[in-house]
């Protein structure tokens, strides 16, 4: 079984404050994109796992997803899983979370067990806040920690250029930057927004200010994308990837050519939900 674990960008990301459980209250808009890790799952005599360039042990999100599936299904997953990483880690593109979600989906396709449906969302949340989104794909809103996801109408009439500046930013560290050092937890960019605030012309990412303070070169990339023809550019997630939105693929490709001597770049497109699932699994 061949699986494609598509990445995401955050079209909008607001950090509303710190919750009683220590996490942050988030409002975000996820968008699946056509850039993916490849996962192959095959029957085996015992569990085998390889994912070059990542930890190949029980800490890997894919292995954690396998263990979670085993507990829910009451089985031992005797499978060989090979992950080919294409989506860079620590860039705010959700590659590890996508790998976990798609592995869980793939195992269910393989074993077809009767699972307690109402428990699946919490199991996925326990793997990571972004993981539930990758069971929806397309465009979706994320509430709570970003783990309460709801389908939104697809809008895919644009092209994307993703710029990887080669900087790894761990999300936990980025969240810590949102707290002013001389005060008890106060979020720098606290922004009480309602659903009516989700308009294209006011979309933002509250991580940009603290991340750009530490990595000013990222702000320059964002500005350069606009100078190269993007009608909007932004940080994805907690970074470090920057994306530009373009009306035409030729514009995105031209901007990529201007940047690819300095950065890894990817011309791609947003994925509507139907295409996301159509291309996810090949058996």
Image: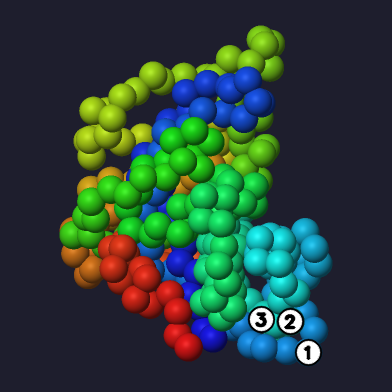
Q: Quadrant of the N terminus?
A: bottom right
Query: As drawn, is 201 to the left or to the right of 260?
Result: left
Q: Earlier in the sequence, mark 1 or mark 3?
A: 1
Res. 107 image quadrant: bottom right
Res 263 visible: no
Badge 2 local density, few (<14 within 10 Å), some, or many (20+)? few
Marks 2 and 1 in Cβ contact (< 8 Å): yes
Mark 1 or mark 3: which is in front?
Answer: 1
Q: Which residue position is annotated with label 1?
A: 45
Q: Residue at x 38, y 59 (%)?
A: 137
The quadrant holding residue 27 is top left
Between residue 130 and residue 66, name the one nearer to us: 66
Q: Residue at x 77, y 80 (%)?
A: 47
Q: Is residue 210 above or below residue 265?
A: above
Locate residue 224, reporting x and y percent: 36, 49
From the image, tell me which residue sits under label 2.
Answer: 78
Say which residue label 3 marks: 82
Whether label 1 touches label 3, CB < 8 Å: no
Residue 26 in view here: yes
Q: Position of residue 159 (x, y in %)?
A: 26, 62
The answer to whether residue 248 is above or below residue 244 is below
Q: Secondary structure at mark 2?
A: loop
The answer to whether 191 is drawn above or below residue 279 in the figure is: above
Image coordinates for residue 57, horizontal then vertical, percent: 81, 67
Dot 2 or dot 1, earlier in sequence: 1
Dot 1 falls on a residue whose secondary structure is loop
Report the residue at 23% width, 28% height from top: 196
- Residues at marks 1 and 3, CA–CA distance in whole angstroms: 15 Å
How far apart marks 2 and 3 lie (CA) works out to 13 Å
């Amino acid at each position: 079984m061949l699986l494609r674990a598509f990445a995401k960008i955050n079209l909008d990301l607001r950090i509303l404050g710190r919750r009683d459980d220590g996490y942050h209250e988030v409002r975000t808009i996820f968008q699946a994109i056509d850039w993916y890790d490849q996962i192959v799952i095959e029957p085996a005599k015992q569990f085998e796992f390889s994912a070059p360039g990542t930890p190949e042990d029980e800490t890997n999100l894919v292995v954690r997803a396998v263990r979670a599936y085993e507990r829910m299904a009451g089985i031992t997953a005797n499978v060989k899983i090979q992950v080919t990483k294409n989506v860079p880690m620590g860039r705010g593109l959700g590659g590890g979370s996508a790998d976990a979600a798609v592995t869980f989906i793939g195992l269910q396709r393989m074993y077809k067990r009767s699972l307690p449906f109402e428990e699946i969302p919490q199991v996925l949340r326990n793997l990571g806040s972004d993981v539930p989104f990758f069971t929806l794909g397309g465009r979706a809103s994320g509430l709570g920690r970003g783990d309460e996801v709801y389908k939104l109408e697809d809008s895919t009439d644009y092209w994307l250029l993703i710029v990887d500046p080669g900087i790894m930013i761990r999300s936990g560290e980025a969240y810590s930057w949102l707290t002013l050092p001389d005060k008890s937890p106060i979020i720098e960019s606290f922004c009480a927004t309602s659903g009516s605030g989700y308009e294209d012309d006011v979309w933002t990412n509250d991580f940009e200010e603290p991340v750009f303070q530490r990595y000013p070169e990222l702000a320059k990339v964002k500005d350069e994308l606009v100078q190269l023809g993007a009608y909007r550019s932004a940080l994805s997630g907690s970074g470090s990837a920057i994306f530009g939105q373009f009306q035409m693929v030729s514009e995105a490709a031209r901007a990529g050519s201007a940047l690819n001597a300095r950065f890894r770049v990817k011309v791609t497109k947003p994925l509507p939900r139907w295409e996301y699932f159509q291309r996810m699994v090949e058996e």
